Image (cartoon, rainbow, N blue to C red):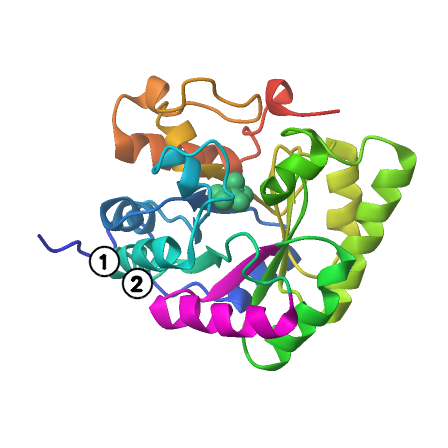
Amino acid sequence: MVYSSQPETGLTKKVTIQTLKKLKHQREKFVTVALYDAPMAAMAERCGIEVVLVGDSLGMTVLGYDSTIPVTMEQMIYHIEAVARGNRQSLIVSDLPFMTYATPEQAMVNATRVMQAGAHMVKIEGGRWLAPTVTMLSERGIPVCAHIGLTPQSVYKFGGFRVQGRTPESAAILREDALILEGAGADIVLLEGVPAELASQITASLHIPTIGIGAGKDTDAQVLVINDILGLTERPPKFSKNFLKETGEIKGALQRYAEEVKTGVFPADEHIFT
Ligand code: KIV
């Protein structure tokens, strides 16, 4: 089977980091989906989804683990290659899995592997301690998405999947982390599981785009996991929405999600942490 990347109503040219920066500048929202295989990647392209994330969430959504921690480089590469075969136009972001970027040198080696597998940007989880790593990757031509807030690889340190930045002190740390990571060369900051007001302040303080999940309406983009969009998750998180229930077919679900993000309908109040 050939997974056609011929756009129908979707993307007509390649999305780059410049495209995303321009959209932020024009105050136009863009759309991200975490997905893991060629047919979904092709569908995302046809639905005009600007960014696809090959998330290490695949450990939970595809492989059945109860966290992202067991995910390996080999598993990531297998899925990045599949996604890259199915989609020629979206910007493909790949997670680096747990402990594969504990030092800048280790990050270089592993980021090289995912870029050679077809990713256009790497995503790494953590705050200011990652600044030297971000600079090292960025100076060598590897774009970086810095993921802060509820970083799932730290689930055991947090004691569960808990909203971060709820106290004035922890909110201040996240605001500073975002600025430090931008200064270090990050191209995107992804905010997960933080109060909407904090995400809004961080988004306004940065020149680079923010992508939010469980981070309110005001981030420059939203990301959802494909399993949540399609109602495959047994206990869906508060910030997610089953779009398939409304539309009855997969393409319609992705199109509705994209439309609702772009028009500011999603996330609604019920999906937001205050
Ligand atoms: O791994 C992933 O899919 C993610 C998103 C949920 C942001 O990190």
Q: Position of residue 100 (x, y in %)?
A: 54, 61
Highlighted magenta segment, given as a residue range? 103-124
Say if 29 sits above or below 269 in the image: below
The residue beneath circle 2 is 88
User: Hey, which quadrant is residue 80 in on the image?
Assistant: bottom left
Task: Tell me the residue at 35%/24% (across/down).
Answer: 232
Q: Is residue 177 left or right of residue 29?
A: right
Q: Residue furthest right?
A: 169
| Residue in the foreground of this view, choosing between 230 and 18 | 230
Locate the C terminus and report the quarter of the image it occupies. top right
Near-viewer residue (101 or 213): 101
65 left or right of 85 in image? right
Question: Image point 27% across, 21% down: which residue?
Answer: 248
**Residue at (58, 81) in percent of width and height:** 140
Q: Which mark is residue 159?
A: none
Dot 1 amino acid type: Ser
